[in-house]
């Protein structure tokens, strides 16, 4: 199992310099909105479109930032079965349902990035997930999430880039 050489079929890759596309807000702000949308999918049983529209409606992200949110949200949703299976393998003694909804959403977002977004270094995905935990969950959760993502990262590094 390794990083896919391409993103899922309905998610085209972003092009051009990121700061220019987002008006300087950066991926962190867009990633936070994607996290909120993923959380809505889990908690509110919203559709991806409803969750997307909800988080970008009153947000200062420009078209590039909204597109990044859309890519993360739909990419995670399209690949959620594989993502959840992988999280389950590394969340030792914890079922996916037992994880807090915030931690589960953060893990799903980070694992999606690690598997499918070659434009985002794995170390960045892990660091951003830890920072999201510190902001939206707890310090204990940040260590737990870091451990799960570190284990997944090691497996991805050993298996190379092939996904088959």
Image (tube, rainbow, N blue to C red):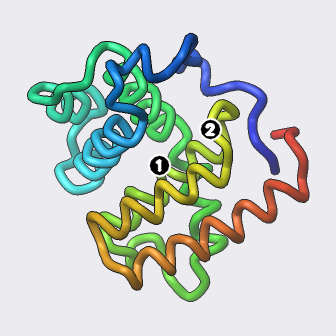
Quadrant housing residue 23: top left
Q: Residue furthest bottom?
A: 93
Give the vertical position of 104 relative to 35 (above or below). below
Quadrant housing residue 105: bottom left
Q: Which residue is mark 1?
A: 109
Decide: few, some or many residues near mark 2? Use Cα within 10 Å; few <14, some 14-19, many ≥20.
Answer: few
Percent x, y for residue 110? 52, 52
Residue 164 appears anywhere in the view: no
Give the vertical position of 73 relative to 138 (above or below). above
Quadrant housing residue 120: top right
Q: Secondary structure at mark 2?
A: loop
Mark 1 / mark 2, whichever is N-terminal: 1
Q: Residue at x 58, y 18 (%)?
A: 13
Q: Secondary structure at mark 1?
A: helix
Give the vertical position of 42 relative to 16 (above or below). below
Lateral position of residue 35 relative to residue 52, left or right: right
Percent x, y for residue 164? 85, 39
Lateral position of residue 127 relative to residue 131, left or right: right
Q: Nearer the viewer, residue 83 or 19?
A: 19
Lateral position of residue 143 relative to residue 106, left or right: right
- Label ID, residue 120: 2
Percent x, y for residue 59? 16, 29
């Amino acid at each position: 199992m390794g990083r896919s050489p391409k993103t899922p079929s309905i998610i085209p890759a972003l092009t051009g310099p990121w700061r220019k596309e987002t008006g300087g807000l950066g991926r962190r702000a867009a990633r936070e909105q994607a996290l909120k949308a993923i959380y809505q999918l889990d908690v509110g049983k919203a559709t991806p479109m409803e969750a997307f529209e909800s988080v970008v409606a009153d947000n200062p992200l420009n078209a590039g930032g909204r597109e990044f949110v859309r890519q993360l949200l739909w990419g995670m949703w399209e690949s959620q079965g594989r993502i959840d299976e992988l999280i389950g393998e590394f969340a030792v003694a914890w079922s996916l349902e037992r994880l807090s909804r915030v931690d589960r959403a953060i893990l799903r977002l980070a694992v999606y990035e690690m598997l499918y977004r070659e434009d985002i270094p794995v170390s960045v995905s892990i660091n951003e997930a830890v920072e999201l935990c510190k902001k939206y969950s707890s310090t204990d959760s940040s260590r737990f999430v870091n451990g799960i993502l570190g284990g997944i990262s090691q497996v991805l590094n050993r298996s190379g880039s092939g996904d088959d």
